[in-house]
Amino acid sequence: MPQPIDDVYEIVISGELAGQEVSNVFHYEKVSASVDPFDIVDSIHTIWVNDVLPSVADSYQLNTISFRNLFDPIDVGEVTYVGDTGGLVAEALPSHDTFSIQLVHNEPTVRKGRKSIAGVTEASQSNSLLGVPVVSAFTTSMSKLTAETINDPSDPLLAIARAVVVKRIPELVGSVTRYRLPANISEAVVGYIFDVFVDLYVRTQNSRKIGRGV
């Protein structure tokens, strides 16, 4: 079971769609101790703006990207953004109707990763079947977000991180089994992503329905 070689950061991309908060969580392993996590945030922001936002509704707005080191509770930070909106001037479906992306990795003991991205437009789908252009665009953008090599935003030849899927650790709390992320590198198990699949159909993320979460 592969363990990370360095710190693993949880990156939370937070925005809103038609006034409702929507968030997406990714995990990245630093490739060396000298990497500044704010550089990881800058790289993710660049991909989000250049590759993801052009394929989502203009009613989506990016608000913040935050990070936290899974192994160091004081290693946290956040960057606020203004004016980063979706690129498609079209009516958006509700935020619980999403692009669904599966992340395929190399560790059989870790569940496949799955991401749900809000901002699907009426024009991007027909009877819930997504059009070929938007599926192709999302395959490209998600491949960049979950790449084995995330490069420094100021030096495209300098690798600073790689995307991972992190195994949750079961804990018995009373009579209930709960799952948590690892708190130190020795208990961490990760899968290294080597492929992504974008579902051809619009999928529903129930946790984003009104009254059930964000």
Image: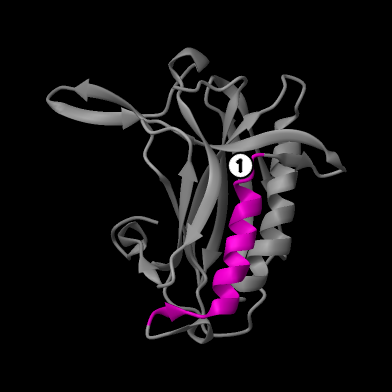
133 relative to 174 in the view: left or right: right
36 relative to 144 in the view: left or right: right
Q: Is residue 144 above or below residue 157?
A: below
Quadrant (top left, top right, bottom left, bottom right) of the C terminus: bottom left
In the image as oriented, which residue stretches furthest toward the left? 175
Magenta segment includes 3: no
Percent x, y of residue 37: 70, 32
Percent x, y of residue 175: 12, 25
Q: Residues within 10 Å of mark 1 (few under 14, many from 20)?
A: some
Residue that label 1 marks: 66
Q: Amino acid at mark 1?
A: Ser
Quadrant (top left, top right, bottom left, bottom right) of the N terminus: top left
Residue in view at x 49 percent, y 16 percent: 184
The magenta stretch spans which residues? 128-148
Can residue 62 be seen in this snapshot?
A: no
Taking depth in this image into account, of 183 and 77 the one nearest to the observer is 183
Percent x, y of residue 132: 55, 78
Kindly state the secondary structure of the residue where label 1 is placed: strand
Q: Quadrant of residue 192?
A: top right
Magenta segment includes 134: yes
Taking depth in this image into account, of 2 and 153 the one nearest to the observer is 2
